[in-house]
Image (spheres, rainbow, N blue to C red):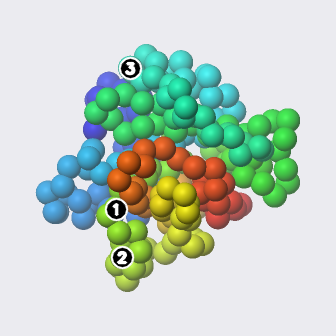
Amino acid sequence: MFSEKSFLKEYFDDYVRQNNDARNFMHQIENCKFDISALVDHCTIRAFNIEHVAKWLYTEGFEKVSDGEINMGDWFLQVFYKPGYPTIVVDQPNHDKILSSGGGRIIYDWIVKFGYRQFHHVAVRVQEIEKAVHIWTQWGVPFVGDIACDIDTGLKQIFTKPMYRDGHPFTVLEFIERPPGCTGLVVKNADKLVKSVRS
């Protein structure tokens, strides 16, 4: 999916190795002979400075999506794109507007604990998210909160319950259902997802 020499390949392999749900998902996909690169929608990095990570992504051939910044107030994200690859999303807390209970504080605390040289989550596309959640719940994979659904676009997303490291939420797997023509991310869903997993 990513070049063997890419730091993104290292991030992806580390993420799968440390997240049981992701490992199980990859195993199921391999058994069904699906191409995992066709199912991964995006991979997310959390960082104190998006531009710092952007410099690495530019060397990998990724470009900043011109309308790919979403601002939640106390945190924001930027989307990076390279043809034939999953998009890379980078979340950054807004240091001037961090609230004690907001998404910016959650992201800030996560970076302090775990750093920024790894994926926080990988999102995989599913055709019917409700059905996928039902099946994976029966298989013993717990999810947090309700499915986030944007009324305007129909975009649906949900996180699995996080893997924990040193007593703190670490990585999650995301399921995402994209209606035809929906290619971006939306404020309502993004903020709800971040707040669904608290320390």
Q: Badge 1: how crowded within 10 Å, few (<14), some, or many (20+)?
A: some
Residue that protrudes farthest toward the left in the picture: 33
Q: Which residue is mark 1?
A: 126
Which quadrant of the view contains residue 19?
bottom left
Q: Badge 3: how crowded within 10 Å, few (<14), some, or many (20+)?
A: few
Name the kind of residue labelled 1 in the image. Val
Helix or strand or loop: what does disc 3 sit on? loop
Rendered location of residue 47, percent (x, y):
64, 35
Using the numbered discs, state the Cα–Cα distance from disc 1 to disc 2 in whole angstroms. Answer: 9 Å
N-terminal label among 3 and 2: 3
Q: Nearer the viewer, mark 3 or mark 2?
A: 2
Q: Which residue is mark 2?
A: 131
Q: Nearer the viewer, residue 23 or 44?
A: 44
Q: Is residue 91 above or below residue 64?
A: below
Name the kind of residue labelled 2 in the image. Lys
**What residue do we see at 27% from left, 44% from top?**
37
Name the kind of residue labelled 3 in the image. Gly
**What residue do we see at 36% from left, 76% from top?**
131
Q: Which residue is mark 3?
A: 61
Helix or strand or loop: what does disc 1 sit on? loop
Which quadrant of the view contains residue 90?
top right
Q: Badge 2: how crowded within 10 Å, few (<14), some, or many (20+)?
A: few
Rendered location of residue 126, percent (x, y):
34, 62
Q: Is residue 160 above or below residue 41?
A: below
Using the numbered discs, state the Cα–Cα distance from disc 1 to disc 3 in whole angstroms. Answer: 27 Å
**What residue do we see at 23% from left, 59% from top?**
29
Using the numbered discs, state the Cα–Cα distance from disc 3 to disc 2 in whole angstroms. Answer: 36 Å
Callout 1 touching callout 2 (CB < 8 Å): yes
**What residue do we see at 55% from left, 31% from top?**
67
Helix or strand or loop: what does disc 2 sit on? helix
